[in-house]
Amino acid sequence: MTNLQSLGITDGKEHDPSLTRQRRDFVAEVVKLAEQNNVKLCIENGHLQALKQVSEKFESIRYCLDTGAANLDGEFSFKQYVDKLAPRVTHLYLADNYGQADDHGPLGLPGGIGRENWDYLLNALGKYDNDVVGSFEMCPSMPAMMVRQASEFLFDILKWPNQPQKQADYADLAYSPI
């Protein structure tokens, strides 16, 4: 996983005229090496126009859709991010916020990302045959609380499919900092 800046691409709102031949060659070499080694190169959210330009040039690039970042863009809506990225999403960063800062809140915040957007995300991803991995990107919750809150929201409230089942020997294990 990488971001646009790591590839030397300006994440600006307009096409970057300073994207030199040397930078384009560098990105092309990184993409080629990933393809040769059967590695899925994933780009985490950036400005939607910049992501679109990269995807037009490099078909093998995939996306990490950060739900918190998608909820913050003043120019493009959450649904626009989902529509543009869903065909190539292979990773989800699942976090919530109030639309002001990427504070990595627990999923289901009252006043956070609305249920209609979570439903829209699930339906959009379901249209494609992508193998998607999800990660909870929340703080300052303790790991056990973070997983429990996020799981309850996704599987009990939103009714997302494929809820993980507890293992028989898992019942006695719990995170305990004391």
Image (cartoon, rainbow, N blue to C red):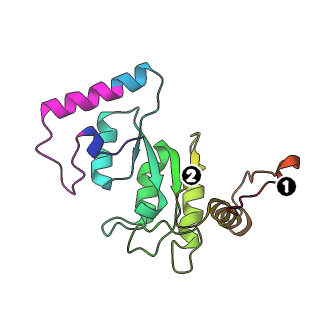
Q: Is residue 10 magenta?
A: yes
User: Measuring 38% from the left and 33% from the top, which residue is drawn there?
Assistant: 59
- Where on the picture, by quarter, is residue 154? bottom right
Q: Amino acid at mark 1?
A: Asp
Other-residue count near label 2 (Cα within 10 Å), few / some / many at <14 / 14–19 / ≥20: few
Q: Position of residue 18 (x, y in %)?
A: 11, 43
Q: Would residue 98 appear left or right of 15 to someone viewing this image? A: right
Amino acid type shown at disc 2: Ser
Q: Which residue is mark 2?
A: 135
Name, please, the residue furthest toward the bottom. 111
Q: Quadrant of residue 114?
A: bottom right
Q: Residue at x 52, y 65 (%)?
A: 139
- The answer to whether residue 69 shows anywhere in this view is yes
Work out whether residue 64 or residue 175 is closer to the camera in this orientation and state it.
175
Question: What residue is shown at x 74% (from left), y 66% (from top)?
Answer: 156
Question: Label 1, on which residue?
Answer: 172
Residue 24: where, in percent of width, then height? 20, 32
Query: Judging from the image, what secondary structure is the residue with disc 2 in?
Result: strand
SS of the residue at dot 1?
loop
Assess whether residue 63 is covered by the magenta stretch.
no
* Magenta segment: 8-31
Q: Is residue 100 above or below residue 92?
A: below
